[in-house]
Image (cartoon, grey):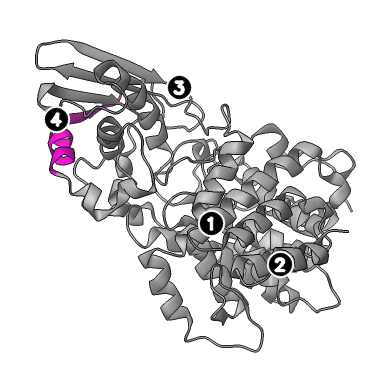
Amino acid sequence: MWAKTVTENFANVIHGLNASHLTDLVIQRSKRMILDTLGVGLLGTSTDVFHKVTQYSKIYHSDASSTVWGHSDFRLPPLYAAFVNGIAVHSMDFDDTWHPATHPSGAVLPALFALSEVLPQKQKFSGLDMLLAFNVGIEVQGRLMHFSNEASNVPKRFHPPTVVGTMGSAAATAKLLALDQFKCKAALAVAASYAGAPMANAATQTKPLHIGNAARHGLEAACLASLGLQGNKQILDMESGLGAFYTDYTPRFLPTLQSYSWLLDQQDVAIKRFPAHLGTHWVADAVSSLRKHLVESDEPVPISRIKKIVVKVPDVRYVNRPFPNSEHEARHSFQFAACTALLDGSISVQSFSEQNISRPELKELLSKTKLEHPADNKPSFENLYCEVNVTLQDGEVFCEHCDTFYGHWRKPLSTDDLKKKFHSNASSVLSVEATEGIIETVENLEKVEDCSVLSAFLKGTQSTKVLSKMCLP
């Protein structure tokens, strides 16, 4: 169908894309994203912010209900299951990051799982259905980000997932609901009125709500559109529509369905090795390399011999936290990443415990650390670098540089390391049997006949053998 507006074009493409449009590379990359998102979401169910939002969400009831990941003891209405599971995904800042800068998967996957569990029983949700809807949600986010050059940089004013993530969730769930072009257009319009949250809440317990709200509100927008609710039919075309978030907004038409090219084919995501802001990963790799000049791997760092530490990074103010006082502040601190990697040789989930954050030796190193912002070090996840200089009391200087950390899209995690990350995260909540079942199911997702198997594994309640019979042809 020929479109007169960008909004109409998006609606036509959301409606018109089908499984045959998926390429092998898009399927492979999106399965990695799905596995990683489920793992960090399961780990995130152990966090304080997750417990607070589930306690709140239990006041809501409906006849329809969906799985809360890692819990077989209670369920929530679909909107609130999407909300709490989305929060779990981002509760540790351990979820994937794309370029232009956003966290794409956490806004989409929880909404799809929540919706899939309340579809009519005769309407099976296959692995290909999941892959298609998921990729529609990811694609919409990426295309919207490309409407602005400003979006290529690390954000300053608002958190991108609250804008493009909400739109992506609406697109993905509209696809799963098989909405027509007119209702897909309405879903985008409704979702736009849920969009946006300020960066001022970075490094607080409120930031994970950004992803939960994006998942929930996108799903809500699609459900309202399915009932006939309408909004502005040119929401993507107007400066007062989605353009309200960007100063250089230039909307463009999508490729034709006859020769559709996915952004995920061209641009992979970064998958994190430890739970913190992506910028800190350059710092960790640079410092880990530098540490080898000072000590053998199992030896303590001679703190008294260190005079000063200089970390050269882009000027990203919300990640400039000289003395973080909480796990959320520590996850958003270049300084914390540098000093922790220097002390311990690496950064892990345990690095952000209250005990580790309050170590006297860490605070001593932090007091010797300062940031510098070279003019050529731009705040873009595509181009930034980190250089670390350590000066000893005797004047000797050591320096290391990182252009691309392990886990960045230019240097992706190996399949084995991705599985190890998932295993470590998921097995903290689920049985080994359920953990292995999710890995096997996601690895074969395009062949899975009924995705309800994944929801059962996420509860951790059923046998792998029984469920494998249900899901594979």
Front-lying residue, 437 or 155: 437
The 10 Å Cα crowd at callout 4, few under 14, some 14 to 19, many 20 or more, is some
Residue found at x 90% / y 42%: 258
Residue found at x 81% / y 51%: 446
Front-lying residue, 106 or 419: 419
Q: Position of residue 18 (x, y in %)?
A: 85, 53
Front-lying residue, 296 or 40: 296
Dot label at residue 426: 1
Residue behind mark 4: 368
Foreground label between 1 and 3: 1
Mark 1 or mark 3: whose residue is earlier in sequence? 3
| 181 relative to 98 in the view: left or right | right
- Measured Cα–Cα span from mark 4 to mark 3: 24 Å
Residue found at x 44% / y 39%: 278
In this orientation, does residue 420 appear?
Answer: yes
The 10 Å Cα crowd at callout 1, few under 14, some 14 to 19, many 20 or more, is many
Give, as a single range, the part of the protein colored magenta.
Answer: 360-374
Q: Amino acid at mark 3?
A: Asp
Residue behind mark 3: 403
In this orientation, does residue 232 appear?
Answer: no
Mark 4 or mark 2: whose residue is earlier in sequence? 2
Dot label at residue 300: none
- Measured Cα–Cα span from mark 4 to mark 1: 37 Å
Foreground label between 4 and 1: 1
Q: How many marks?
A: 4
Residue found at x 25% / y 14%: 398
**388 in magenta:** no
Residue behind mark 2: 186
